[in-house]
Amino acid sequence: MYCKRILDNGIRLVTERIPSLKSVTIGIWVDVGSRDESPAQAGYSHFIEHMFFKGTATRSATDISREIDALGGEMNAFTTRETTTFYVKVLDQHLPKALDLLSDLFLRSRLGKKEIEKEKQVILEEIRMVQDDPEDLVQELHTKLVMGRHPLSRSILGRESTIAQVSRQDLMRYVAMHYRPEKIVIAVAGNFDLRKLEATIARTFGKYQNPSRAVPGKRWPAELCGGVTMKQKPLEQVHLCVGLPGVAAGHKDRYAVYALNSVLGGSVSSRLFQEIREKRGLSYSIYSFLSGYSDGGTVTVYAGTQAREVERVLDLVCREVRKLAKQGIDRDELKRTKDQMKGGLMLSLESSHSRMNKLAKDELIAGSHTSLEQMIIEIDAVTEQHVFHVAQDSFVSKEIALTGLGPLSSRQVHALTARSL
């Protein structure tokens, strides 16, 4: 059963009670991410996510780790380009202790100077790890190409220069500006007593205020960029990203775009996987994925292949993209895709953690809840014609962006793409 309550200070509480589960997951979502940072603040959202686990007024970082381990639970956090999330998943009987722990680190983090200096090194190592992972790195480079100078182009981890210079005062100011009650959503899913939960949340978070008068900057949509870029690096493979326009996370065409992505490269039965990996053996890893933001989105194809096969792989990717734009998909293909989407959706929502994620995203994107039954209805309503129109709008050759990483020069890649794109 879904329920929404707004505390007196503006914090939103969204819950879904599922008595059949033995677990409960609580998430605190803040509507701020890397796109909300200035260039001088690059990486602050992610840094704060780390720091909230480094000790409070009454608990050390070790205490926090030991307490969650003693409950047999999972506590973690993650930062995206638009949100920062802190969550804990435990057995339902441990909900009071888990909520006390999570609220303590969120409301009373010390942000100690010594811990900040130590964590700088951890995050700098995290940035270097991306540099050593070609698949992650090419996708970071691709986002920079597609988003141009827009804040969405920046790395969530930030830059080494901004991380090395960040101070406690910088982080405190950032929290004061962005961690406002009206930008916070608390999502809870699983087995719990709703009346007790609401009373505890109101008592714990109801007095939270942010006295800062600083006003966060407003978001604006990105204008997607096309083009070709290549970073030469001595690797065994060339790693490629091919990008096209997508839609926003809450867009009316999102289910048609999900279907289109699934057919293109979103599954092992997709056209790209079957054509490039299974039929021709040109790539071990080949897939497509969607990136949906509050005001726009992209479709990206990733592939890793031998340098000598880059032209063939690009040609096959572009051929499938053009085919979808000119012909769409047939009835049988759409039926298989819709069945796959519905099956994947239902399986993904069997855990309290995934239900919590959905509750929060629904609230942040649309301000309301979409039931599983309504989602199934919307998937069933997708038609071949609808997918065809979406493909015509999104799969436009002149807007294709290509990013490469590996043992090829920019001149070589431009020459190859001139024949494919």
Image (cartoon, helix red, strand yellow):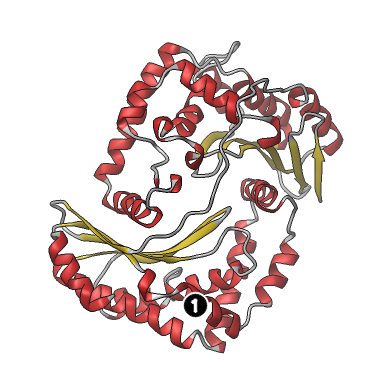
Q: Name the residue beneath numbered marker 1.
A: 391
Measured as percent of width and height from the top left, residue 2 is found at 80, 50
Q: Is residue 273 left or right of residue 134?
A: right
Residue placed most toward the observer, 250 or 188: 250
Res. 115 image quadrant: top left
Q: Residues within 10 Å of mark 1 (few under 14, many from 20)?
A: many
Residue occupying the point 42% across, 33% down = 43
Q: Is residue 318 visible?
A: yes
Vertical relation: 369 (above or below) 414: above
Badge 1 element: helix
Measured as percent of width and height from the top left, residue 346 is found at 64, 63
Measured as percent of width and height from the top left, residue 206 is found at 78, 25
Residue occupying the point 76% across, 49% down = 18
In the rendered image, the quadrant that contains the C terminus is bottom left
Residue occupying the point 50% across, 43% down = 80
Residue placed most toward the observer, 192 or 384: 384
Q: Is residue 236 left or right of residue 93?
A: left
Q: Is residue 87 left or right of residue 144?
A: right
Measured as percent of width and height from the top left, residue 16 is found at 76, 47
Res. 31 image quadrant: top right
Res. 310 image quadrant: bottom left
Amino acid type indicated by mark 1: Ala
Number of marks present in the image shown: 1
Identity of the residue furthest to the right in this view? 195
Residue placed most toward the observer, 74 or 136: 136
Q: Is residue 281 visible?
A: no
